[in-house]
Structures are given as C-alpha cells and as structure tokens.
Amino acid sequence: MDTLAPAFRDKDLFVRLFGDDVYAVGGYVRDLIMGTPSEDVDILVIRRPAQELVRKLKPHGRVDLVGKSFGVIKFTREGKTYDVALPRTDLPRGGAIKGHKDFLIEADPGLPIVKDLERRDFRCNSIALRLTDGTIVDPLGGVQDIQRKVIRLTNPNAFPDDPLRVLRAARFASVLEFSVDPGIYDASKAIDLHGLSVERVNEELFKILLQSARPSRGLEELFRLGALEQLYPELFSLTLAIQDSVFHPEKDAFGHHTVWQHTKLTVDQAKALAELVRLEPSIKLGLLLAALLHDAGKPRTARWEFKRGRMIITNNGHDIQSEKIARKFLQRFRIFSWNGYDIGKMVPLLIKTHHRAAELWQNRESVTKKAFNRLAADIQGEIELLIYLDAADRAGRKERLVKKLDREARWLLKKFEDLDVNRETIKPLVMGRDLVKMGVEPGPGMGKMLKRLYKLQLDNKFETKAQGLKAAKSLVEGRPA
C-alpha cells in the first residue's frame, strides 16, 4: 500500500494553502487504512514557520495558537476544528516523568517528518498521508501493524516517558479490537500512573466504555497492564474475589469464577442494551459506570454458608456496600455530571437499587402498586435505566451479547406503564405552600408532615391533588389522614 485517497471537508483548502508540505497524520490515516474514514483529522505542515501558518489560515476561519513552543494551531472553519501542527519533538524536563506537563515540547518547521512520527505513541498512529497525492509516509511499519491488528510501540525507550500511553494502549486495543504486543506489558510494569490527572484518566476510561463494541476488552487490558491495580483498587479487588460457580457459571479462559469476569460481561451486556434502546451518550455512560461498579461491594461481603445441602458463597448487603464504594470512586475521579447528566447522583442510586427490580418480578403474583411507586421514587424516576442495569446484570453470565430485552425486563417495563408509574406521577402532590395556606408554619414540623404525606402518596392512599389536600387537612387537624 503506497497511496490512499484522503477525502475530508477542507482537504482542498489545506492543499491550496500549503501544497506538498501538508499531511494528515495519526488516527485519521489509521482509520482510512482500516476502511473506516472519519472527519476527525489532525494536520501536519512541514517547512513552514508558525507565523506563515497563522497568516494563511486567518482569512478562512478562526485561528487560536495553543502554545508558541508547541507549534499547534486550533483552526476552526464553519464549526469544524482542526489541530494544525508543525513537526515537534518531546523532551523530558528532567526528573521523574508522571504526566504531560513533565515534557518540553519543541516545534521545528525544519524537522524531518520522520522525526515527528517517531515521537508518537504506537506504530499504527505513526503514519502520515500527503494530501496532494495520497502518498503514505510509513517509516516504522504502521501499515503492517494495522493489517495484523496489533498495537506496537513506536519507540520502546520513550514509552515510560508518557504514562498516559499505558491507558491509551488499553483504549486502542479495545476500540480498534487489536491485540497488544507482549513487550508493552513488560514495559508498563515499572510505570507509575499516580501522577496522571483524573481528567486524562477519565477520558481514556470513558472512551473504552463508549467507543468499544465490547468494553470488557479494554477493561481486561487495564488489568493486564497494571493500571487496574494502580488506579482502580476497588476494581482490582474484584479480580481476586470468587463467586459461587453454580449461581455464576461464567468464568474466564483459565476457569476462574471471579467477580471481575462477571463485571466485564455485565458491562458488555449494558453496552449492547444501551445501543439497542439508543440511549444518548451521557445516559449511556451513567449506565456503563453503574454496571462497572455494581458489584464492587462483593469482596467485602463474601461469606460461606451451608445452604441447600452444600457450601455456597453469599454476598448479602453487597448492593449497599457497592453504593458506598461507587460514591467514593466518583468523588475521587471528580465524576459529577457529564454533558448535563448527573452521573454522580444517578450511578450510586442505580447500584443501590439494582436488585429491587428483580424482586418485583420474583413477587409478581402478589406485588402491589405501592412497591412500584416506592422503587420509582427511590430511583428518582430513572425506571428504564434501572431495568436495563438489572437486565445486563442477569445477562452477565453469558458471553453472547443480548439482542433484545428478556421476558423479565419487558414485564417490568409494561407493569410500570400499566400502573401509570413514571417520573411525573411520583412527583409530590402536596407542597409546602399548600400547608402554609392551612396555617402550618414553615420549619421541621412542616418537613415531617410533607414526608408523611409523600409516603401516603407512594403507598397509594391518594392519587390526586384534591385527595392529597384532604389528607393534609386531616393531619393538620390531628385526625388520621
């Protein structure tokens, strides 16, 4: 493979401005070789000083210089932003390397393009494509790695200089479905990841979850690369916790029935369900994080019990422990909201209540509307998401991805619909202003009365505003509601 036909929106503009000196680099080239072209293009311009780049680009869009020494320009045209860079070298500032800020990045227009490619992380990303004629510049064998579907280091000696590359190896292996060269596992053992910013760590984890067909692939690579033990000890503990092999027959390739294996499968199934029902990305991420942490409390609650004629591993109360662990996890990584969705609030709630949907099904012959009301209130109206998590947990005993909601999930969705229990119907009917009109003074007493009335509402003692006001009046007058 010597040439490709690059085709993206502003290709002709870049060619007109910079001729043979402009290249597409990195992921765009890799994806084009794989037959999955994208509009996410990084541009490299050689033999031109930064001032010339700025001068030529300005008439055609907004130009923002990221850093004078970096030689990177953010060029935005008609809503599309490109990184336009000069050839660069990365030099350690000295001392221990813990993150990107420990590098001195120098731009040099005269630097040969091969030198710029040598600074990149993996060979599959160290390829350039000249825009004028589609010539591929591949001095490091990146095309061959793409064809073999393997992640290999561009420069093994420089790999420890950037700890983020450990996480990127896991992400690329997961998203691209590539294998990881064994040398990367050896090189990653001595790399300290604790200095990485939570923002960069989160970015890699979120991409594994959202962009992988099977996120379990990236999660397992995090385990193999040592990142799980360093960054996510609450998940690493799952790798050492066994489950009851009868209730949880799922096992890894070596026969281990671990909570980790079940967790990975549950995340895969949650991803499949999220795609099936077309959840928007922010809500999808909430579901996937809940699946990732839903059994984090099992190592703390594991006990042997003699039941049904044999010794059984039980994990009573693990949902409560998992919720506590999830809250600390989200706080440590400063995961609060994402694209407007309150992940910090909803993920622990989903985890805490993830068994209660199944309990409704198990007691379906006798369960009343009161139970549905209370669960909907406790999950703050995220009924469907809870049902999807419950379904993923149930399907997390199988490798084959689900293609539809199972019978239990369909029954739950229909039952909530038939009973008219939803985000709107669980809103309190009686408010503080209603009690003020009845002469109740604001304060702790009013708060207790409102809680009492909301409990009556959820218990289905009243269903309309008028009925609620009548109950409130009875409480104010000291009579049974």
Image (spheres, grey):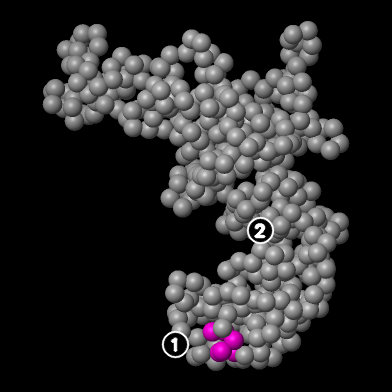
The kind of secondary structure the magenta stretch mainly shows is helix
98 to 44, vertically: above or below: above
**In terms of depth relative to the viewer, which is nearer, 116 or 425?**
425
From the image, tell me which residue sits under label 2.
Answer: 195
Decide if residue 116 is in sight here: no
| Residue 50 falls within the magenta-colored stretch | no
Q: Quadrant of residue 88?
A: bottom right
Tell me the element at label 2.
loop
Find the distance from the CA under tag 1 to the CA under tag 2.
Answer: 41 Å
Query: Which label's residue is closer to the chain start, 1 or 2?
Result: 1
On residue 59, which mark appears? 1
Q: Is residue 114 left or right of residue 11?
A: right
Tell me the amino acid under the disc marked 2. Answer: Gly
Q: Return the x and y of residue 85 as percentages of the image width and height.
A: 61, 80
Q: Quadrant of the N terminus?
A: bottom right
Tell me the amino acid under the disc marked 1. Answer: Pro
What range is drawn magenta here? 13-18
Q: Quadrant of the C terminus?
A: top left
Q: Return the x and y of residue 275 as percentages of the image width and height.
A: 57, 44
Decide if residue 470 is in sight here: yes
Tell me the element at label 1.
helix
The nearer-to-camera label among 1 and 2 is 1
Residue neighbourhood size for the residue with mark 2, other residues' Cα within 10 Å, grouped as few (<14), some (14–19), many (≥20)? few
Q: Return the x and y of residue 408 as percentages of the image width and height.
A: 57, 24
